[in-house]
Amino acid sequence: MSEVITEVRDTAGLITLNRPRAMNALSLDMIRALTAALLTWEDDPRVQRVTVRGMGPEGPNLRRRAER
């Protein structure tokens, strides 16, 4: 599966980073894919906003750390 998954839902462009073993750190290929998606959506009247999310396990529980 691709490390960058893009789709349009309603008026949102969705970008999912799919490199959980590297904690979704961006590679050069991923940056190129992100750039291509954003440039395509720039002229797409359906896309009014963009959301970026990451696949994989949740990160550290910051609330729990703050309560210590």
Image: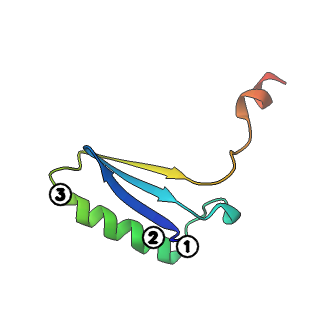
Amino acid type of the residue tagged 3 in the rendering = Asp
The residues tagged by marks 1 and 2 sit, at their Cα atoms, a distance apart of: 6 Å
Please report whichever mark, 3 or 1, sits nearer to the chain's N-terminal start: 1
Q: Which residue is mark 2?
A: 31
> Would residue 8 appear left or right of 53 to someone viewing this image?
left
Q: Residue at x 45, y 70 (%)?
A: 31
Where disc 2 sits, the SS reads helix
Q: Residues within 10 Å of mark 3 (few under 14, many from 20)?
A: few
Amino acid type of the residue tagged 1 in the rendering = Ser
Tell me, for residue 44, which label it has, or none.
3
> Would residue 23 appear left or right of 16 to someone viewing this image?
right
Question: Which quarter of the figure has residue 6?
Answer: bottom left
Q: Residue 60, how many percent across, how many down?
A: 74, 42
Where disc 3 sits, the SS reads loop
The residues tagged by marks 3 and 2 sit, at their Cα atoms, a distance apart of: 20 Å
Residues tagged 3 and 2 counted as in contact (Cβ below 8 A)? no
Q: Which residue is mark 1?
A: 27
Residues tagged 3 and 1 counted as in contact (Cβ below 8 A)? no
Amino acid type of the residue tagged 2 in the rendering = Ile
Q: Residue 18, how many percent across, how many down?
A: 56, 62
Question: Which quarter of the figure has residue 21?
Answer: bottom right
Q: Residue 62, how many percent across, how many down?
A: 72, 34
Q: Residues within 10 Å of mark 2 (few under 14, many from 20)?
A: few
Residues tagged 1 and 2 counted as in contact (Cβ below 8 A)? yes
Q: Residue furthest bottom?
A: 29
> Would residue 45 appear left or right of 3 to someone viewing this image?
left
